[in-house]
Amino acid sequence: MRLGHSALMRKALEKEQQTQNEMILSLMPQKVANEVMQGSYNSEDDGEVNEDDGSNDPKSNGIWRDKKSTKMKKLVKNGGALTESISFSDDNYSANEAYPLKGSEEVISRGQHRPYGSDVKMASPSTAPSQPLPVAGHAVKFRKFHVSQMENVSILFADIVGFTNMSSNKSASQLLCLLNDLFGRFDSLCELNRCEKIATLGDCYYCVSGCPNAVSDHAERIVEMGRSMCVAIQQFDDDHDEQVNMRVGVHTGKVICGLVGTRRFKFDVWSNDVTLANQMESSGKAGEVHISETTLHFVKDIYEVSEGEPVPDIRKVKVLIEYYNKEDQRYAIKHTQDQTLIKTYFIKRRFDDKPVVTLDKVTPITEVSVRFPQMAILRSIEGG
């Protein structure tokens, strides 16, 4: 009897752990999740290293710490590419300081839990927190915020053309079904094309390749993702009798990637090159993949392209200071954009005629079932 109960408990715990892992991976890539869960910096990394000779000290592990700003830099070899990882620590709280996970339990040290309000004491006094446990409303940082700067990352923005017309005559639940169906297809294609989804911004889909793991074929992967999306939305139109399309923009450049926030945080990327990728999407054509000259440099031997209209290089901005504005009676700063243009291109076909990655069988989401308050559960119905 006890053996059967233990087996059931073990299966329940394994299922719970699997669910937790799936939730974590839905917020960030596997590599970033491993760093957050295991700790990318050990306690040995917190020692101060001299800026001048830190790189020559074998014990420094390539970490440099500024004593004044408590900012650490670490050179990380990532898939053959050297990236810079920066960790910001908060001097107001120690590494072992407790933080609340949820209302029913508290964390009193790394990896140890106790019920909220329990009188259970820790077995080892050496690991006990030196400060009182935080109360509700007391924001405590539970991890170090770290970011990485990476080069040769390809960024894709895709926007639904005709979304306004599609959403104008539908209820909220119907629109939710359509978006979940479409973005669910894109998520599957993102996996098949080995890209990394970043976010959905309204009716915009946003993903990258070459980040957080550096790869040599990042540009080809992201272009194939764009081609797959253009085919997938045509399948979506056929399944739902809609008239929508995709406008896809791609650019390659440098990014800063990392986690944002300490509550409901997410993995994200930022840079002027990301903004330029967004501009490539907005200046593109429906049903085609619009790439920059930089991206073409990586895929010129793979794809046949046609030339597009040049776009302003928004990365080059001049700042002019007007010393005094007489009309407003104040000093003002005026930003003027440089007129530098960059060449753009549209993907036509592959030279080797390799087929586009598609989803063989898709079960459209056709209904929303509300079973719990404030929770919509999507139900897939065969042939519905």
Image (spheres, grey):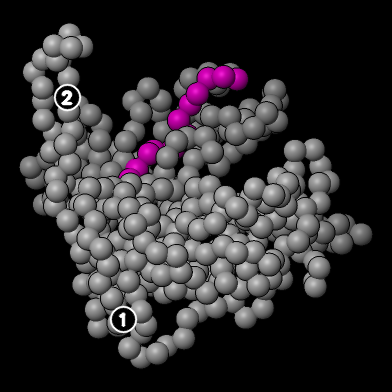
On screen, residue 346 versus residue 37, left or right, reads left
Which quadrant of the rendered structure holds the C terminus? Answer: bottom right
Query: Which disc is residue 348 wearing?
Result: none
Q: Amino acid at mark 2?
A: Ile
Magenta-tinted stretch? 136-148
- In terms of depth relative to the viewer, which is nearer, 258 or 153? 153
Seen at 42% across and 88% down, the residue is: 354
Picture coordinates of residue 288, whole percent (x, y) = 41, 70
Residue 140 on the magenta span: yes
Query: Which disc is residue 303 wearing?
Result: 1
Vertical placement of residue 105 versus 151, above or below: above
In the rendered image, which residue does mark 2 sit on?
A: 333
- In terms of depth relative to the viewer, which is nearer, 51 or 19? 19
Seen at 17% across and 24% down, the residue is: 333
On screen, residue 120 versus residue 334, left or right, reads right
Which quadrant of the rendered structure holds the N terminus? Answer: bottom right
Picture coordinates of residue 171, whole percent (x, y) = 73, 46
Magenta-colored segment: predominant secondary structure: loop
Picture coordinates of residue 260, whole percent (x, y) = 42, 40
Q: Residue furthest bottom?
A: 352
Picture coordinates of residue 156, whole percent (x, y) = 39, 60
Q: Residues within 10 Å of mark 1 (few under 14, many from 20)?
A: some
Q: Secondary structure at mark 1?
A: strand
- In terms of depth relative to the viewer, which is nearer, 90 or 181? 181
Q: Amino acid at mark 1?
A: Tyr
